[in-house]
Structure formats: structure tokens, C-alpha cells
Amino acid sequence: MKLLHRNIFKELISIFTLSISGFMGLILIGRLLQFRDLFMGQSLGALEMAKLFMYLCPFFLLMLTPIATMLSIFLTFLRMNADNEITALKSGGLSLYRLLPAPIIFCLLCTGADFYFSLYGLSWGTENFRNALMEFARTQSQLAIQPGVFNKNFPGLVFYADGVDEKSGIMRSVFVRDNTRKGMTATIVAPLGEIRTDPKMGRLLIHLENGKIYQQEKDQLSVLKFKNYDVRIPLANILKGYDVDELRPKEMSWKKLVRISRAGDRAGDIDPGFFKKVQVEVQKRLALPVACLVLGMFAVPIACIFRGLKQQYGLIISMGLFLVYYTMLSLGVTFGESGVLTPVIGLWLPNITFAIISVVLLKMAVMEHSFSIRIPFLKKFRRKEA
């Protein structure tokens, strides 16, 4: 039995590795195409691009681990069923229940890994991804502001610095003309300035010290002194339209999500729509890892009750079944955010439904109930080839 479980586990690991690698490759290629303008505009090297993709991996792995788990178990048991290995084991006195320890351990390991991505990896990747983008934007802006040159690359803003320290980035004798506000023009003069980033708020700022603001509104002119003043630089031009704004619920850390969801009496101070999104995200972070166990156990009887099914068709069926699960999950997210269903019901209903179905199908598989898959148009195609 140890040898049997070891071999099953090895096959599960190999298919899982191949599946997750293939899915991640396709997604990262898609992201590369999406960010091509950003990468070209920032003149990023291969190492910087690899870092950005690495920071995005936990977000994708959270979604891909359940489907890779289901696919691995489905294809493994489908192959064993097609090669009559399961029939041979049953004839030797082993029931299907005796084959479950290996897939159960495999599902638990995948669930644990997905919980790590959900509770820790996602926030780590999001934070580092935003910090990296903000650092690229700061460097690009610092390069754009050349000493003794008026910079007009940003709409509504004109920058000028008499001198710029290349190492520290500190600017001297800074002049800024701000036309971003309707009906008002602000001219800012300061002896010192520095480009700073605020990754949490998604802002790139020019920090000025000990200067004056000359505000002109219609025929009125006012002069204000300041000790510290920040001019916000629009990131759309630097990051080619990529949105780096305040953290959205799906980008927040687990601790922050729980803290907001447990606001209690203070929940009234939070935007109701945002509060519902936070509650939905909390349940989603818990439901997706558990889906590894649910979908993995669902794949075992599905693979056993279908006979005469080749692996390529099994791949289509497993993807279709996961699409059903993902559709139910997406509906749960939509209904939870709109208030039609509570987040607990909306996000956990797919897991409960698939868990009940898997128990029923497992009993059918143990009782050796099976379905024969016949695809008529494939038979006609084979006859024409013959």
C-alpha cells in the first residue's frame, strides 16, 4: 500500500507541476502584453521585469492552485481507470476508499499552500509590486527633471530646478507652475525640493520646503508661505495608464481586511459598498484554499465513473467543471457585494454544493456505477480517415 500511495502521489505532483507551470506561463505572457507600454516606457531590464512578475505570482497562484489540484487528481485517476489499474486493484480486494489517502494528503498540502498565498503571499506581492512601480516612476520623474530645463511632460504642470543632486535627488531653487485646478493658477517657488513616493496611497510627490505660493484666481492674487508643501505628479503619464491608487480590498493584507470587517459600531463611518467588498474578500480568501480540498475530492469519483474517456477529453471536462465552480463563485461575489446574499452564503455555497455532489458520486463510484462517454462526430471523423 505504501508503494501504491507513493506512486499515486508522484504522479499527482508531476501533473500538478506541469499544470501550474503551463497556466502561469500563459498568464504571465498575457500580463507581458498588457504591460508592454509600461515596460517600454520605463526601459526596464529583464531582472526588473522578472521581479514584477514574481510579485504578481501569489495573486495568480491563489486562483490557479484549486484548478491545478483538481486537474492533477482527475487526470491521474482517469489514466488509472483507462488502463484498468483501478479494476485490477479492486479485483485484488482493494476498494476505492483504500486509494484515497494519497489524494487527500495531496489536497491538504495544496490547501495549506493556497492558505499561505491567501493570508500572506498576496499582500507581500501586492506591496512589493506597488513599491517597485512607484520606485520606477520616481526614478523616471527624477531623470525627467533636468537642471536648468523647464519640464512640461506632465499635463498642467511645469517644473524647473536650477540644480539637481544626482545621488540624493535633492533639487535646489525649484519653480513649479500648477494649472491643474480650474480657474486658478498657482506658482510655487522653494529653495529645496525632493521627489518622494507614497506607495500606500499610490502617489508620487514633489516635496518642497520653506517656499511661497502665488495663487491667482481671476483678478485676485494671494501669497502664502509654507514650511512643507507637496505637489502631486500624475502617474498616468509615467506608468502608461496603469492604476496605482489606494489599496483595493483584493490587494489588502489579511490583518487589514479582518480589522475593517470587525469595525463594529465604527462600520457606519466606512462606505457601505467598500465595507461589503471587504467582507466578500475575507470570505473569498478562506473559500478558495478550501476549494483545493473540495475540488480535489470531487475529481476522484468523476474520473472513476466515466469509462472510455481519453485524457484530452478529460481535460476539457475538468476545465468545464471548474468553469461551473468559478461561475458560481463569481455570482457569489457579485451578489455579496450588491447585498443580495450575505458573503458567507455567496462565497461558501459553491464549496458546499461540490462537496455534497462529491460524496454522492464517490458512493456511486464505490458501487461501480459508471457512465460511458460516446462522441458521435468523432466516430464519423475516424471512419472518413480510414
Image: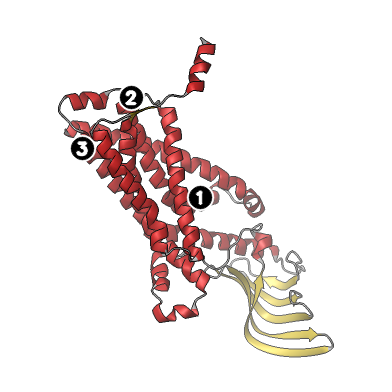
Q: Pointer 3: what residue?
A: 97
Q: Real-space Cα distance between discs 2 and 3?
A: 19 Å
Against 344, residue 292 (above or below) is: above
Residue 228 appears at what percent x and percent y? 61, 83
Residue 265 appears at what percent x and percent y? 41, 81
Give the image quarter of residue 94.
top left
Tell which of 160 and 293 is nearer to you: 293
Residue 53's tag is 1
Dot 3 lies on which element? helix
Q: Earlier in the sequence, mark 2 or mark 1?
A: 1
Of circles 1 and 3, the one toward us is: 3
Residue 251 appears at what percent x and percent y? 48, 62
- Verify CB contact (< 8 Å) between mark 2 and mark 3: no
- Amino acid found under the numbered disc labelled 1: Phe
Mark 2 surroundings within 10 Å by alpha-carbon count, few (fewer than 14), some (14 through 19), many (20 or more): some
Q: Earlier in the sequence, mark 1 or mark 3?
A: 1
Q: Earlier in the sequence, mark 2 or mark 3?
A: 2
- Amino acid found under the numbered disc labelled 2: Ala
Residue 383 appears at what percent x and percent y? 51, 12
Against 103, residue 136 (above or below) is: below
Q: Pointer 2: what residue?
A: 82
Against 330, residue 71 (above or below) is: above
- Amino acid found under the numbered disc labelled 3: Tyr
Q: From this viewpoint, is residue 309 visible?
A: yes
